[in-house]
Amino acid sequence: MGRLFFIPNPVLRSKFSSRINTMTTTLQELETEIITCRKCPRLVAWREEVAQTKRKAYINEPYWGKPVPGFGDPRARIMVVGLAPGAHGSNRTGRMFTGDASGKFLFPALYRAGLANQPNGDEPEDGLALKDLFITAICRCVPPKNKPNITEIKTCLPWMADEVEQLPELQGYVALGRIAFDGIRRMYQMQGVKLPKMDFGHNTLNQLGEGLPWLLSSYHPSQQNTLTGRLTEAMFDAVWEKAKAQLH
């Protein structure tokens, strides 16, 4: 059984995204649109500056330096949502959660859960394949200090809405961090959907409403959480087991 409900009506959809008359029909076409976006001047300037100055460890490597689209299984029943590309991770590789510490914690967990074919995701051509999973983010450009402002978040959310529309089997979300949790909710609220009260918490499951996907939240797999023990492997594994248990 696939996704039952997302956009309440075409009028609200047209208010939510100015691209209503040019909606894409495939994820590949949508990816082409996303990587050409230049709507947020501050983020465009920062992502390109990072790509030019680089980190010393990657000084001889090319940087992506463009918006990062989502990736994964086109028949995914779970959408994983992060905050934004890492400055020297996704902004360098062009693939979400690839090439940084968060990905080195995330992909082994997905492999242990049977949601990825291998435990590593180092660069886009490494053979990584996701099963039943699509990974995306609230913002597609790396923000200074990892802090996009609310205007930038609102500007970028329609891209995630378009990805959702291209995933006909979608049943639920896993939000990695509070900003992702709030962003998913905001995506629906921007369409006029009234949501029940819910609180962010690690491995906390919420229902967005009748006919809507469920929303499971987790602490973000950043080093700030993983190196301090706030998020352990066992805690993270429990999230993916709960997510799989919701599928039908």
Image (spheres, rainbow, N blue to C red):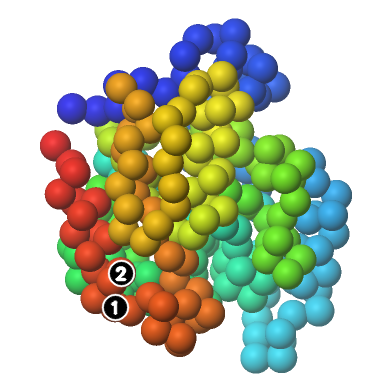
Q: Position of residue 52 (x, y in %)?
A: 80, 74
Q: Secondary structure at mark 2?
A: helix
Q: What kind of residue is marked 1?
A: Glu
Q: Secondary structure at mark 1?
A: helix
Left or right: 162, with 130 as reference point: right
Q: Position of residue 116 (x, y in %)?
A: 26, 63
Which quarter of the rendered picture does the C terminus lie within? top left
Q: Name the residue: 31% across, 58% down.
A: 203
The quadrant holding residue 183 is: top right
Q: Name the residue: 39% across, 84% down.
A: 229
Local packing at callout 1 (Cα closer than 10 Å; few below 14, some 14-19, many 20+) is some
Q: What kind of residue is marked 2?
A: Phe
Q: Is residue 35 visible?
A: yes
| Cα separation between marks 2 and 1 | 5 Å
Q: Is residue 92 visible?
A: no
Q: Position of residue 53 (x, y in %)?
A: 81, 79
Q: Name the residue: 18% across, 42% down.
A: 247
Front one among 229 and 26: 229
Q: Position of residue 39 (x, y in %)?
A: 79, 41
CB under 8 Å between callouts 2 and 1? yes
Front one among 235 and 126: 235
Which quarter of the rendered picture does the N terminus lie within? top left
Q: Is residue 226 above or below residue 159?
A: below
Name the disc covering residue 233, or none.
1
Q: Name the residue: 25% across, 59% down.
A: 240
Name the residue tied to disc 2: 236
The quadrant holding residue 150 is: top right
